[in-house]
Amino acid sequence: MAEIATYLDYNATAPIKPAVREAVEAALGKVGNPSSIHRFGRALRDEVEAARERVARLVGGRPEHLVFTSGGTEANHLALQGAGVARHLMSAVEHDSIRNALAGPETVPVDADGRVDLAALETLLNARPEPALVSIMAVNNETGVVEPIAEAARIVHAHGSRLLVDAVQAAGKVAIDLQAQGADYLTLSAHKLGGPTGVGALVLGADVPYTVPVSGAGQERGRRPGTENVPGIVGFGVAADLAAAALEDFGNIGALRDRLENGIARIAKDAVVFGRVAPRVSNTSLIAMPGVSSETQLVAFDLDGFAVSAGSACSSGKVDPSHVLLAMGVEKAVAETAIRVSLGWDTKPDDIEGFLKAWESLYARTRGRKVSAA
Amino acid sequence: MASNAKNRGKRIVVAMSGGVDSSVTAALLTEQGFDVVGITLRLYDSNQATSRSKTCCAGQDIYDAKRVASQLDIPHYVFNYENRFRENVVEKFAESYAAGETPIPCVLCNQKVKFRDLLATAKDLEATALATGHYVRRVEGRAGAELHRAKDAARDQSYFLFATTQGELDYLRFPLGDFEKDATRALARRFGLEIADKPDSQDICFVPDGRYGRIVERLRPEAAREGDIVDAEGRVLGRHQGILHYTIGQRRGLGVSGAEPLYVLKVEAKRNRVVVGPREALAATKIGLRDVNWLGGPLPVGAGRDCEVKIRSTQAPVPAHLAMETDGRAGVTLFAPEFGVSPGQACVFYDGERVLGGGWIAGAGAAVMDATAAA
């Protein structure tokens, strides 16, 4: 096994930036509970509120409408259950934390590039009179394709419905303005943008319904019971600030991404980059190597020292064909050969060159033999 | 055992089930200096299996394999083979019962899953070999690798590997073939493996509680239909509970009685009948085989030879004459009759220790006595 490992899986978890780590360590050294009246509690409360402002600023939300959670999954669940709407529509490419949250969602199809079909959205909303909560992610975690949130919001609001935007993969990669884009509920996760795992946020738009679905004490203005994860929240705040400051430069990663995709196109005429012609964030490539299962690729690249993933990371280590690609109309046999390469702030040109070599080697040695895909 | 410098950088994939045998296999090869990569196959959803642990590749076993790999400091991966296992093994298992046969799924699993797809994956991963914890020996012969019985006859698993092709065998390694089971456990303790005292798996892995009937019934409900139990003349003696519950040579649980003990002679799937009769009617000397596989030189069509054959996993090889009929089909003449030869089982050919090949039992000539056969 290769001794040196190159991390190309930022969409799973981005490496923690040094300043974030320092802030988290400092917070871990402080005693107290932010709900306490005494000076220890007050000091931590100040830190939590400062972080709240920083994270809210990243997405154009109001700090008093931001609820810290344990991550993106919890934030999505709080929104879906707290909105108090019986009818749920969602795009066909949502994350599992949305797809599996409520029974009987109506699915809004996407086009071949993975962009939500706005005409279909309108038709679905017209079909029944009662208002709905509509879930559309800002950026797809597997393809990096940017969804037309503002356009979708206009349609949703014209029908008296509400929009939940899962911005977990968008924050820090593209500019987000909750108000301008018309999101009623917006969710975030710290570890996707250089913060720690185990912390996320639900940001509420102005005057949207929300009833806390979990009973407990009155933390987070009664919107999310449980003692705050102070070190995580502090780290989230610093990461959000850094991400906001680096947002303009994030597009530069696109040069590395293009280098990767052009390199693969040179090696293999039959390789496919999904959503390539759609608007995408600059760090994500979902690439099919024909005839080689995603599982085999992941293992081969890991042994060669390159960390990538097959669509979304799965706790069991089990790889299923991506529902995102199937929704885009990609054949199952092709979808089963896709891997996601996601770059970030610490990715170097040499990382891309090294990965291209590994990709070419696997591609070359798997030609002329039968398909090992599931 | 000294670490072997010549093995350094040579990658070997080890199929790790989480049990003692494959864990020790991985440990031995790691100690010998190989670049060992552990792979565990997820063959079925362990949550759907009725009981847990004890059997191969249930959830706990994947966890155990991961722990062992971590102890050995080798990379370890889980591959999801649920679909191909269901198609190639579980469905064929049910089909076989529905056809009135008595299947052995482990052969299909080795043939269609481990040695085909996992082996191809190992090659994709630039491994020089695929190693398993089977108790068989691979001997380098003049014309390529040969498959031999394990040193420990009680542990020998060569019967289950008869369908291995020469190309597969060339690539496979079986480091445990020279060990006895006790030695393997001792090694597991010496390596400090936490699974050293884990019980052996006994059952068919995907039916951990031994109640295979439920799986067969779900996939092939027709095999669970009640029907008649008849004698050789077709007289109805009683009712059966579905042909899947009957295997040739079975005496218990028939619920019918005669002047002498009655045994299952035939399971007639098309007529949904179970035919019973006295023990002597079970005697068979002629066995027809299909899908015959040769390891190291096939017998030409029309040719014949004497060898030893093993017609069930629990029985020692017996002398017989083998005649190749057409491509893939062979006829076996036993020198002494066998009682309870079941279609769906394997008939494996041996020349002493060496496995020559084998085939699937398609039918047996009950009561067809050959002139050469001793009574």
Image (cartoon, coloured by chain):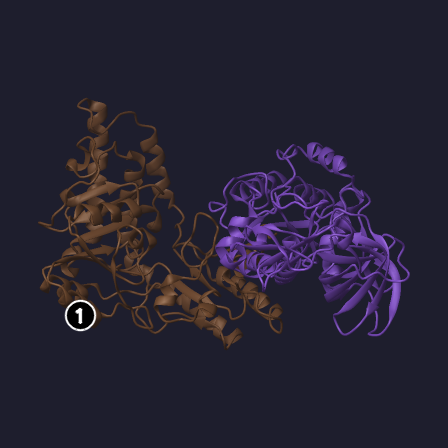
Q: Nearer the viewer, residue A13 or B229?
A: B229
Most extreme residue toward the top, as rendered? A38
Q: Colour of chain B?
A: purple
Residue assigned mark 1: A123
Quadrant of the drawing holding the N terminus of chain B: top right
Residue drawn where x is 75% and y is 53% of the image:
B159
Q: Nearer the viewer, residue A222 or B291?
A: B291
Q: Please, which chain is the residue tagged with disc 1 on?
A: A
For mark 1, give the secondary structure: helix
The location of residue A49, given as percent across then percent down, is 19, 37
A258 shown above or below B31: below
How many numbered discs sit on the rendered protein? 1
Most extreme residue toward the bottom, as rendered? A269
Q: Nearer the viewer, residue A133 or A187?
A: A133
Residue drawn where x is 88% and y is 53% of the image:
B375
- The answer to whether one can see residue A256 in this image is no
User: Please, what is the three-letter code of the amino acid marked with disc 1?
Assistant: Thr
Left or right: where A250 falls relative to B243: left
- The answer to whether one can see residue B187 in this image is yes
Q: Nearer the viewer, residue A276 or B206?
A: B206
The location of residue B321, given as percent across then percent down, is 86, 62
Q: Colour of chain A?
A: brown
Residue drawn where x is 44% and y is 57% of the image:
A347
Left or right: where A72 falls relative to A163: right
